[in-house]
């Protein structure tokens, strides 16, 4: 199958190769993040969250019905736990009177002497640092972003009108930000138009969050901004209690089951081994300058999918596999996602990747983890205003492992030692995000 997208908008976003060389630090390891994680753990102990977890599981099970393959049912409960945890992290970030940035959408990890619950769901992107802060219409806010090294390939700051982050109110992306000499920025948020103010977002009555995606193409060298938020108009309300946050998270988790069932059906509702053509993602709750593809594959042990895609001048490009429940697939320790920077390009500028359950012997292995079924995503972010190389395009062909082109096997040949080094480097780069 070969597809191309024909409508591409927005200006090109610089990738930051010329950024000053600064020591990398973990911008997430803040007292506010640690406090939010403790709040999430406390919310899980409340009766309202336990009831919501039961409701969520029942609702998803009823919606999927008999369409769930029997072997995928084994991971259903774990997926439901992560779905609810994701909403508890959002609840921990929801206080617009006393805002704080909270990281979400992570697999389980341990740091600061604690275990942190996994919160993967909705096709979470392992290349992203996801952070949210509560915003209230009528409030005035100042956000500072301090560069901590080479900047992400692309960053977006979006006011969202729902907990599912699919209702966009206003977005700023990398190319629209005015930065200081050190690469940092200051952003203002209130209920008034910008009126010439740079780096400004305007709220609407239904605003819930400032939702930040920092997309890394090279995990080893790119690092997220250190973000801080303050409300600059006076407030006379106390911070939300754990009980209040639990009530909000529980309600929203149950309320938005239909939304995320619909997202899942964008993939699982397709015929097997099918990928949709690229489309602009704003139409389904994604970024304004993003194009994406969705699909799913069911593979025998010796099947592979030969994938070729055109980066099309985007600031950030990547492919990803998820499990049946739409969670990233052990991406911290296997190449179940590959960015352009993590891949070897072809001479014509396209990138060839092999999706396989077992190592196909090529550098660009999209590792399905020996899973029979995987959901498939492709993302192009920060697309240039003028179409480059025909715009986002993708080709997918299912074949047997021994039918892979010999030229590809020669060009991308990889030894067992080099594969292990690839994985070791990946793990080390990922661990930078969970090191205090």
Image (tube, rainbow, N blue to C red):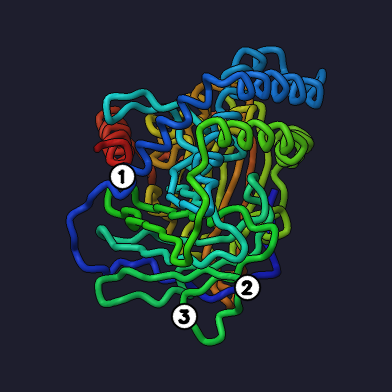
Other-residue count near label 1 (Cα within 10 Å), few / some / many at <14 / 14–19 / ≥20: some
Other-residue count near label 2 (Cα within 10 Å), few / some / many at <14 / 14–19 / ≥20: some
In this picture, residue 149 sits left or right of residue 152: left
Q: Position of residue 161 (x, y in %)?
A: 67, 55
Residue at the spot 59% in from the left edge and 24% down from the top edge:
79
Q: Position of residue 54 (x, y in %)?
A: 69, 18
The disc, 2 or 3, on the residue closer to the chain's N-terminal end is 2
Q: CA distance from mark 1 to mark 3?
A: 27 Å
- Residue 202: give its label: none
Residue at the spot 38% in from the left edge and 70% down from the top edge:
186
Which residue is label 2 attached to?
9
Which residue is label 1 attached to?
30
The disc, 1 or 3, on the residue closer to the chain's N-terminal end is 1
Q: CA distance from mark 1 to mark 2?
A: 36 Å
Which numbered mark, 2 or 3, is in the foreground of this view? 3
Q: Position of residue 136 (x, y in %)?
A: 59, 58
In this picture, residue 159 sits left or right of residue 13: right
- Residue farthest to the front? 236
- Quadrant in the picture for residue 139: bottom right
Residue at the spot 78% in from the left edge and 25% down from the top edge:
64
- Residue 198: give its label: 3
């Amino acid at each position: 199958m070969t597809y191309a997208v024909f409508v591409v908008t927005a200006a090109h976003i610089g990738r930051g190769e010329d950024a000053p060389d600064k020591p990398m630090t973990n911008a997430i390891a803040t007292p506010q993040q640690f406090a939010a994680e403790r709040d999430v753990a406390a919310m899980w102990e409340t009766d309202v969250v336990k009831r919501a977890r039961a409701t969520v599981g029942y609702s998803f099970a009823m919606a999927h019905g008999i369409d769930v393959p029997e072997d995928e049912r084994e991971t259903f409960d774990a997926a439901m736990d992560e779905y609810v945890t994701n909403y508890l992290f959002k609840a921990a970030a929801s206080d617009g009177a006393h805002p704080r940035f909270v990281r979400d959408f992570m697999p389980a990890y341990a740091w600061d002497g604690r275990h942190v619950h996994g919160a993967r769901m909705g096709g979470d992107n392992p290349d992203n640092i996801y952070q949210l802060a509560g915003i209230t219409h009528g409030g005035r806010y100042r956000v500072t972003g301090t560069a901590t090294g080479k900047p992400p390939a692309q960053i977006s700051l979006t006011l969202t009108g729902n907990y599912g982050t699919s209702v966009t109110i206003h977005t700023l992306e990398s190319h629209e930000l005015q930065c200081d000499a050190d690469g940092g920025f200051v952003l203002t948020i209130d209920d008034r138009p910008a009126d010439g103010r740079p780096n400004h977002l305007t709220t609407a009555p239904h605003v819930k969050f400032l939702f930040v995606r920092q997309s890394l193409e090279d995990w080893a060298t790119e690092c997220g901004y250190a973000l801080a938020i303050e409300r600059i108009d006076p407030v006379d309300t106390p911070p939300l209690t754990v009980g209040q946050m639990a009530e909000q998270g529980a309600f929203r988790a149950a309320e938005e089951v239909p939304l995320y069932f619909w997202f899942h059906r964008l993939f699982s509702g397709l015929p097997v081994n099918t990928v949709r053509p690229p489309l602009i993602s704003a139409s389904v709750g994604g970024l304004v300058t993003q194009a994406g593809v969705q699909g799913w594959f069911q593979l025998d042990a010796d099947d592979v999918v030969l994938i070729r895609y055109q980066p099309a001048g985007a600031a950030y490009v990547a492919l990803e596999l998820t499990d049946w429940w739409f969670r990233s697939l052990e991406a911290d320790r296997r190449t179940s996602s590959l960015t352009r920077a993590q891949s070897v390009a072809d001479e014509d500028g396209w990138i060839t990747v092999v999706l396989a359950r077992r190592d196909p012997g090529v550098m660009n292995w999209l590792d399905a983890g020996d899973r029979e079924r995987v959901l498939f995503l492709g993302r192009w972010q920060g697309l240039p205003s003028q179409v480059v190389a025909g715009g986002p395009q993708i080709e997918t062909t299912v074949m047997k492992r021994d039918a892979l082109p010999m030229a590809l096997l020669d060009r991308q040949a990889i030894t067992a030692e080099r594969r292990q080094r690839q994985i070791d480097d990946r793990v080390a780069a990922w661990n930078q995000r969970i090191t205090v």
